[in-house]
Image (tube, rainbow, N blue to C red):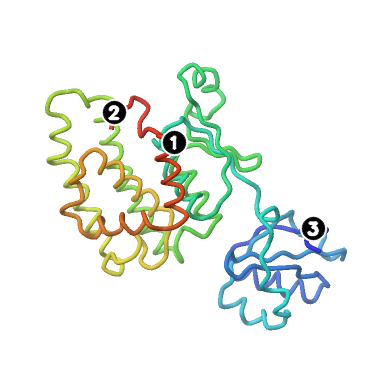
Amino acid sequence: MISSARPLFVLRNRSSFALLLFHAIFSHLRILSSDSRSKVLLISSSSPLASPLPRAPFAVSFRSIAWNVLHLVPNSLLFQNIPDDKMPQKYELVYFDIRGLAEMIRLLCADSGIPLVEKRIKTDEEWTKIKKNFVYGQVPCLKDDDVHIVQTGAIIRHLARKHNLYGRDEDDQCHADMFFEGIRDLHSKYTDLIYNNYDTPGKKDAFLASTLPTALGQLEKLFVSRQNGDHFVLGDKICFVDYALFEELDIMLILDRTTLDNSPALRAFHQRMNQRPSLKAYLDKRAADCVKVNWNNKQ
């Protein structure tokens, strides 16, 4: 039974999967279960030959090279759902009780079914007490076992690499990074408005009249460069940048509900993302909890 198994480790590339599968077959490792939907395979062994392998649990991506050997394994062992308690450990996210810089991370986890435990900072006094515990004195901070990661971009890329949300190849990754940095440029200008100039006469109007349309025009052009913008940032496969883009568009619509009137591809993308079942459930709960966008209540 799976509950008595000692799973081994985490892998996510074609060559490692094939080598591991051959090792399993020829070294008397016992393949316990896999899930074709979540792309997970569990194995264990009482054989001493398995002892040099790293620790568990492990997930592997099914790729073409793997299918060349999968026929050697009985189907009854390959397509069983793995209980939730056998999936990878939960991450812990520390951030303020706002959407802010952490919301794209929450969206990614909610939509992808990645377990996430949250520690939400609710007061300035609470933050002052714990601020010294974080590199750069900043949050969000993601705790992944003994690894503590700060900086939003580092966190979301870490999750993307671990959960196959970073594209298919280096070209995809380059495109994703380029798009992500464009979103962050816009967000930097947005936060400057929100925290420094929101009540300064003319600043919000200038942002809406010039800064925002220029940035959205650039993002729209880049978005339609992949499959005419009919799906996601990278085309037909969702990636971490889609969650950053969705959140950025969402907060801009709060700032001005006509924001996307001249960006049809981005508007359609925002509507599609809103209807993804897991994401919609998260968004409905967020609305019910009345989570504010920014710490100073400006939006």
Give residue 178's position: percent from left, percent from top.
Answer: 34, 53
C-beta proximity under 8 Å, tags 3 and 1 = no
Q: Is residue 87 left or right of residue 139?
A: right
Quarter holding the N terminus? Answer: bottom right
User: Which mark is first along the chain, 3 or 2?
Assistant: 3
C-alpha separation, residue under disc 2 versus residue under disc 3 = 50 Å
The mark lying in front, picked from 1 and 2, is 1
Secondary structure under the numbered disc 2 in the rendered image: loop
Q: From the top left corner, tell me how far across and down residue 87 is, in percent.
A: 66, 55
Tell me which residue sits at (45%, 57%) in the image: 277
Residue at (21, 53) in percent of width and height: 218
In the rendered view, does 142 fall on the left or right side of 232? right
Amino acid type, residue under disc 1 in the picture: Asp
Tag 3: residue type?
A: Ser
Element under disc 3: helix
Q: Which residue is mark 1?
A: 289
- Crowding near the residue tagged with mark 2, few <14, some 14–19, many ≥20 C-alpha atoms within 10 Å: some
Residue name at image x 56 percent, y 78 percent: 64
Check disc 2 and give the amino acid type: Lys
Residue furthest front in the image: 288
Q: Which residue is denoted by mark 2 in the rendering?
A: 298
Question: Who is closer to the viewer here, 256 or 56?
Answer: 256
Res 234 → quadrant: bottom left
User: How far apart, in angstroms, are the residues tagged by discs 1 and 2?
Assistant: 18 Å
The image position of residue 207, as x and y in percent, is 17, 36
Contact between labelled residues 3 and 2, with CB atoms less than 8 Å apart: no
State the residue position of label 3.
Answer: 3
Q: Residues within 10 Å of mark 3 (few under 14, many from 20)?
A: few
